Image (tube, coloured by chain):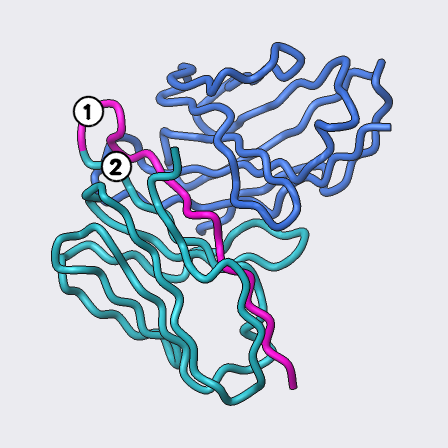
Chain colours: A blue, B cyan
Amino acid sequence: DTEVTQTPKHLVMGMTNKKSLKCEQHMGHRAMYWYKQKAKKPPELMFVYSYEKLSINESVPSRFSPECPNSSLLNLHLHALQPEDSALYLCASSQFGRRHTEAFFGQGTRLTVV
Amino acid sequence: TQLLEQSPQFLSIQEGENLTVYCNSSSVFSSLQWYRQEPGEGPVLLVTVVTGGEVKKLKRLTFQFGDARKDSSLHITAAQPGDTGLYLCAGVGGRGSTLGRLYFGRGTQLTVWP
């Protein structure tokens, strides 16, 4: 099983809403990632969790709040977003700290902020 | 700073033509991965190359890792419309704080016309 599952697939939210994106994997990976991707651009790293601890925050605004409740789950809590935050949000997972790690991506959540 | 330079950025060809996509860096990576992404979906891992000079084949796709592990190429023979998508190379850091971290190129948007 090399599947990373993201929900929801599509999300439309207002600028005053609070919503959460969810990600789940059962590959035993101990590194999980959130990426943001704009149209026709490569994914941009937002956060990295290693062994359920936040190890990298790429200077992401506080209106994005990640959470890793356990080794299989990763959430991204959204609050007071701006229209420019509309993008495809991708979750990925990999083995942690290995030189030849491979990342597996979910299908993404298409987020539209209105 | 873009660690991985990917070229060309856009490629539009007719069915049956051959093409090569390049991924270059001044940094050494422990491994390099190629992904293919379709609109609205997450990137799908195609191949991982690990050893300098390594060549891997996946049907009509041939991947090569440079001898110095700084560059890679993807060659597609007799392209088909189903090959259309965004091709991303990603280098994997091999030491210290970069260990296991993915660094993406900007991507090559390939369109194959019937």
The chain containing the residue under callout 1 comes to B
> What residue is rendered at 55% in x and 67% in y?
B110
Q: In the structure shown, which secondary structural element does the residue marked by tag 1 occupy?
A: helix
Q: Amino acid at mark 2?
A: Gly
Q: Residues within 10 Å of mark 2 (few under 14, many from 20)?
A: many
Q: Residues within 10 Å of mark 1 (few under 14, many from 20)?
A: few
Residue beneath label 1, please?
B96
Q: Is residue A29 above or below residue B81?
A: above
Q: In the rendered structure, which segment of residues is drawn in magenta?
A: B95-114
Q: Amino acid at mark 1?
A: Gly
> What residue is rendered at 71% in x and 27% in y?
A85
Quadrant occupied by the N terminus of chain B: top left
Residue B2 at what x, y percent from top left? 39, 38
Q: Are marks 2 and 1 in contact (CB under 8 Å)?
A: yes
Mark 2 vs mark 1: tell me if same chain: yes
Q: In the structure shown, which secondary structural element does the residue marked by tag 2 occupy?
A: loop
Quadrant occupied by the C terminus of chain B: bottom right
The chain containing the residue under callout 2 comes to B
Instruction: State yes or no: residue B110 in magenta.
Output: yes
Instruction: State yes or no: residue B59 in magenta.
Output: no
Q: Is B12 positioned to the left or the right of A51 in the image?
A: right
Residue B68 at what x, y percent from top left? 13, 53
Residue beneath label 2, please?
B93
Residue A97 appears in which quarter of the rendering? top left
Q: Residue B48 has which mark? A: none
> What residue is rendered at 78% in x and 16% in y?
A18
